[in-house]
């Protein structure tokens, strides 16, 4: 959006007092995200009472609750759903009051205003899976992939602008290409990006645990530019709860999958997401989850308390878990994971890791290794023994660990 608006001659300002147009992007996924979006909208509604500006709200929340939002917050000038950035730019320039149609999540736009060390590249969006807790298909629509060519063009532009890490995202990256090329084609996409010119790395997020297979595993672990990082959101470790969630692989099959990855590359980073407090989750189910986590020993883990979403199958399950019980389980999972994470990181002490140094803080450089996806995982803190060019890849000798971070010195 930013890149398209700048290419059309608009100026992006950091101080809202200088703005003529404010665009708020929103999320409609879980309750906390929806609440955050609403609070942001109301903050700008109050600001607008004393300032002359065009207030536009866009994204998933609008796509999902358009009629309700337009009725209850009439102060907003424009409501735009899930659409291609160029469509929204057109609507803003014309000051259209609303534009909500069938969701268009995949587009050919490749203009980017990105000068950071990493960039997310959407390879597909929407979803055809049937997870019972997830409302995304209802407002994102069916799964749609971008073509090899538009992704390659975007990556090439980003790398030429100095981006060092390309992070591929979709609602489900394992399904990439199934609609365009009649078969899952993530492996082919990675092979095409791997031979592109430039010093950069590729990281893949959101690999569906039921659909990651040997071909994807071997491709990620064999390509030079692709980091050995597997983001596999298993969501639970109890077979009963997995079935209620609409998942197919059992906890044993998930453990076999993890073992398969580590047999090929023991230093692979494996990340997951866990939901606690799912309807019907008993003490026994939770103990099975804890036992599963102890066996799996994920390198990285994100935990979430179940959020009931209207229109989902899970919302119809009557056996609700009390909030305080879910909170206690959440805290127990995080405590266990902090111990596992520390123990998993200890194996790197005394070894060298290629690290993307991204910034400076006092007497330290801050970077990330293959273990760390930005904003959700840890960091590598490096002693500032000499001046280096940032961002860039450097070999770091690891000297110490904490629960989620590494420390080291430049070689």
Image (spheres, helix red, strand yellow):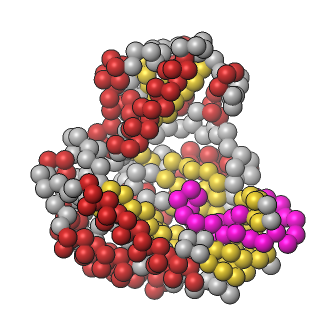
Which residues lie in the magenta part?
Answer: 366-392
In x, y percent, where is residue 114? 67, 44
Q: Quadrant of the C terminus?
A: bottom right
For residue 34, say whether it is visible.
yes
In x, y percent, where is residue 213? 38, 71
Q: Is residue 4 above or below residue 225?
A: above
Q: Quadrant of the N terminus?
A: top right
Query: What residue appears at the point 64 percent right and 85 percent down from the top-left corner?
Result: 349
In x, y percent, where is residue 324? 27, 57
Q: For residue 336: magenta?
A: no
Which residue, as the protein is rendered here, is positioned at the far left? 318
Q: In front: 122, or 28?
A: 28
Q: For residue 370: magenta?
A: yes
Q: Is residue 219 above or below residue 120?
A: below
Query: What residue appears at the point 32 percent right and 59 percent down from the top-left corner?
Result: 327
Which residue, as the protein is rendered here, is positioned at the far right? 387
In x, y percent, where is residue 8? 67, 24
Q: Is residue 401 above or below residue 381?
A: below
For residue 220, say whether it is visible.
no
Q: Quadrant of residue 233?
A: bottom left
Query: What residue appears at the point 63 percent right and 66 percent down from the top-left corner?
Result: 379
Predominant secondary structure, magenta span = loop
User: Number of labelled discs?
Assistant: 0
Q: Is residue 213 left or right of residue 161?
A: left
Q: Is residue 364 left or right of residue 330?
A: right
Q: Is residue 155 left or right of residue 184?
A: right
Query: What residue appears at the point 45 percent right and 48 percent down from the top-left corner?
Result: 124
Q: Quadrant of residue 323?
A: bottom left
Q: In front: 332, or 146?
A: 332
């Amino acid at each position: 959006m930013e890149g398209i608006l700048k290419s059309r001659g608009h100026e992006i300002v950091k101080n809202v007092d200088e703005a003529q147009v404010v665009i708020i992007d929103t999320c409609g996924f879980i309750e906390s995200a929806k609440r955050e979006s609403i609070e942001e909208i109301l903050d700008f509604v109050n600001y607008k009472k004393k300032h002359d500006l065009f207030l536009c709200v866009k994204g998933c929340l609008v796509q999902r609750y358009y009629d309700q939002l337009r009725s209850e917050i009439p102060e907003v000038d424009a409501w735009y759903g899930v659409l291609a950035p160029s469509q929204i730019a057109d609507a803003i320039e014309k000051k259209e009051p609303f534009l909500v149609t069938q969701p268009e999540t995949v587009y050919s736009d490749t203009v980017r205003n990105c000068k950071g060390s990493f960039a997310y590249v959407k390879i597909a969006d929407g979803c055809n899976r049937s997870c019972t807790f997830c409302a995304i298909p209802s407002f994102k629509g069916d799964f749609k992939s971008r073509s090899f060519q538009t992704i390659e063009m975007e990556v090439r532009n980003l790398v030429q602008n100095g981006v060092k890490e390309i992070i591929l995202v979709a609602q489900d990256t394992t399904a990439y290409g199934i609609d365009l090329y009649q078969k899952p084609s993530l492996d082919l996409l990675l092979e095409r990006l791997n031979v592109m010119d430039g010093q950069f790395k590729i990281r893949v997020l959101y690999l569906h645990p039921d659909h990651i297979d040997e071909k994807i595993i071997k491709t990620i672990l064999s390509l030079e530019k692709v980091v050995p990082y597997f983001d596999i959101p298993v969501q639970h470790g109890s077979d009963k709860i997995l079935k209620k969630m609409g998942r197919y692989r059992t906890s044993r099959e998930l453990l076999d999958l993890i073992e398969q990855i580590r047999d090929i590359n023991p230093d692979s980073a494996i990340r997951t997401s866990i939901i606690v407090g799912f309807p019907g989750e008993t003490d026994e189910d939770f103990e099975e989850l804890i036992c599963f986590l102890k066996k799996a020993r994920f390198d990285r883990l994100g935990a979430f308390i179940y959020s009931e979403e209207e229109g989902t199958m899970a919302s119809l399950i009557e056996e609700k878990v009390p909030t305080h019980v879910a909170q206690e389980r959440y805290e127990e999972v995080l405590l266990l994971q902090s111990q596992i994470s520390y123990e998993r990181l200890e194996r790197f002490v005394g070894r060298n890791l290629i690290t993307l140094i991204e910034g400076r803080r006092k007497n330290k450089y801050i970077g990330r290794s293959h273990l760390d996806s930005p904003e959700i995982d840890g960091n590598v803190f490096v002693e500032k023994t000499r001046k280096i060019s940032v961002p860039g890849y450097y070999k770091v000798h690891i000297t110490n660990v904490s629960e989620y971070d590494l420390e080291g010195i430049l070689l």
